Amino acid sequence: MYIVAALIVMAIALGGVMAILDSVFEATGLSALRRVPIIGGHLEVGVAILMVWLLDIHLVGQFTNGMREEWLSWVVDGIVIYGMIPVKDAIVGAIEKGLRA
């Protein structure tokens, strides 16, 4: 259960990191980089993989009894964290709805 919570926290952290990167891109004039189809469309996944590598975490590897290569674990964890963004949004929406009631 704590792995799901850790994935959601990492998805929240990814949202914060992407907000910072977007503001840096705007300040430096690199905002056109987000409009390049290959780079802009997959920047979040790349940042998620980079976060996993920098933090040296292995969340999904616990389910697979270790992967053949360490880089494969980083890539899979990054993709899973990126995939948790809709789950994080749903949880935050449910909490907001509960607080308004």
Image (tube, rainbow, N blue to C red):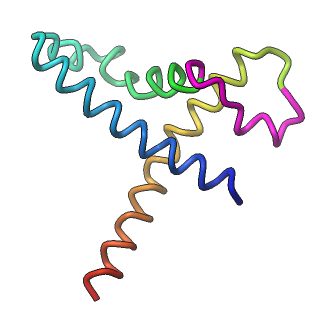
Q: Quadrant of the C terminus?
A: bottom left
Residue 33, quarter of picture: top left
Residue 58: percent from left, percent from top: 71, 32
Residue 7: percent from left, percent from top: 58, 46
Residue 38: percent from left, percent from top: 36, 15
Residue occupying the far bottom of the picture:
101
User: Where does the magenta region start and end?
Assistant: 53-66
**Residue at (56% x, 32% y) in the render:** 79
Residue 42: percent from left, percent from top: 40, 23
The front one of 13 and 33 is: 13
**Residue at (25% x, 14% y) in the render:** 36
Q: Quadrant of the N terminus?
A: bottom right
Residue occupying the far right of the picture:
65
**On the picture, is 63 further left or further right than 11?**
right
Indicate yes or no whether the magenta region holds residue 13: no
**On the picture, is 83 further left or further right than 1?**
left
**On the picture, is 14 further left or further right than 23?**
right
**Residue at (71% x, 19% y) in the render:** 72
**Residue at (84% x, 36% y) in the render:** 64
In the image, residue 61 above or below residue 24? below
